[in-house]
Image (tube, rainbow, N blue to C red):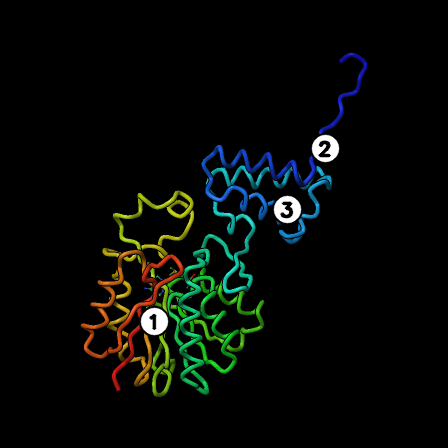
């Protein structure tokens, strides 16, 4: 060097965001801008919105190093939720890890429908069974918004239930939701059956067929739990088993609500209509216009 001391690069919030966004875009990461904002606010321990008023702020070296590690992992398509350990659903924060599906915005429709039906039907203490609770996001959002509901949530995965229980504790709903492990209705022992049946059975079951797996985005295909995605031999296999089993657990006029994937509405309506015990079968469209939720009511 020519006697001059090389100036150390100072990374400001704005420069870090800009550079890393470009890097992730080059790597073909979807939603690069949102990713870097979530990762930097996580590394800094601040709210994402605070970044917008801190563009000129220098970022401490240790935080820069931590952030770079996270960005590298994101470039490998690791979902942001697994990197920050957090996801948002129905305006609530949930802890997530690779044992659970990251809650999806489209699943909010299932919760919204349940809450609307519950409020307009004036149930005093609606009994709700959620099958396949994962992070617990659906059961917890329901318990939070329906303070008199009695909620039971099941999952076949013990490690997913551990995450769901932890989330329920964080939202101070540990006493209001009973979590049980098992394959669909097998999770409920005789004493777990609600006298008179459940007023609602709700589920976002796995609905991807084995043939669709190679076409999924890498961040879903490689990182999210297969048990949360894959409907065994056919996309609607779990829906079919839920329809078959729900009759013995639903109250008279009780409702079954299930989330669907694209282009599954016709087949799903058929499943409910042919059950012999469900009527008033209908689907509800999401904001993109896809028939996302199927609903049926047990005949009186
Ligand atoms: C699509 S994820 C939904 C998770 C969460 N309810 C949500 O909406 O984000 C499906 C969940 O069903 C669970 N699951 C899969 N097969 C099951 C079965 N046979 N019995 C009970 N749960 C099952 C998975 O472990 C997973 O947590």
Mark sitting earlier along the chain (3/2): 2
Question: Where is residue 58, by image quadrant?
Answer: top right
Disc 1 CB within 8 Å of nearest ligand 1 atom = no
Q: Return the residue found at the far top.
A: 2
User: Which one is in front in this view, the residue at disc 3 or the one at disc 2?
Assistant: 2
Tell me where residue 273 appears, x and y as whole percent. 21, 73
Please tell me the numbered disc located at residue 257: 1
Tell me where residue 227 appears, x and y as whole percent. 35, 56
Residue 155 visible here: yes
Residue at figure coordinates x 33%, y 59% from the top left: 290
Residue at figure coordinates x 45%, y 67% from the top left: 138
Please tell me the numbered disc located at residue 10: 2
Please tell me the numbered disc located at residue 43: 3
The answer to whether 242 is drawn above or below residue 3 in the figure is below
Contact check, label 2 and label 1, Cβ < 8 Å: no
* Separation of residues labelled 3 and 2 (CA atoms): 17 Å
Tell me where residue 26 appears, x and y as whole percent. 49, 32
10 Å crowding of disc 2: few (<14), some (14-19), many (20+): few
Mark sitting earlier along the chain (3/1): 3
Mark 2: which secondary structure? Answer: loop
């Amino acid at each position: 060097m020519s006697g001059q001391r090389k100036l150390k690069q100072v990374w400001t919030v704005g420069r870090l965001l800009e550079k890393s966004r470009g890097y992730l875009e080059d790597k073909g990461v979807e939603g690069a801008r949102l990713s870097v904002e979530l990762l930097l606010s996580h590394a800094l321990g601040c709210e994402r919105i605070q970044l917008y008023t801190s563009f000129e702020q220098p970022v401490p070296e240790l935080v820069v190093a931590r952030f770079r590690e996270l960005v590298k992992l994101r470039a490998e398509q690791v979902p942001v939720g697994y990197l920050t350990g957090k996801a948002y659903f129905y305006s609530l924060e949930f802890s997530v890890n690779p044992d659970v599906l990251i809650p999806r915005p489209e699943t909010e429709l299932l919760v919204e429908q349940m809450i609307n039906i519950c409020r307009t039907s004036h149930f005093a203490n609606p009994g709700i069974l959620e099958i396949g609770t994962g992070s617990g996001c659906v059961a917890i959002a329901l318990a939070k918004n329906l303070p008199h509901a009695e909620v039971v949530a099941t999952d076949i995965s013990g490690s997913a239930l551990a995450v769901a229980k932890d989330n329920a504790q964080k939202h101070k709903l540990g006493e209001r939701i009973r979590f049980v492990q098992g394959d669909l209705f097998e999770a409920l022992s005789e004493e777990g059956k609600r006298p008179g049946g459940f007023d609602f059975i709700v589920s976002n079951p796995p609905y991807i067929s084995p043939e669709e797996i190679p076409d999924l985005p890498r961040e879903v295909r490689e990182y999210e739990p297969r048990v949360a995605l894959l409907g065994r031999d056919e996309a609607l296999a779990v829906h079919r088993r839920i329809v078959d089993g729900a009759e013995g657990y639903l109250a008279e006029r009780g409702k079954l609500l299930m989330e669907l994937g694209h282009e599954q509405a016709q087949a799903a309506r058929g499943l409910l209509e042919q059950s012999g015990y469900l009527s008033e079968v209908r689907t509800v469209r999401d904001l993109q216009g896809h028939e996302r939720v199927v609903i049926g009511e047990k005949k009186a």
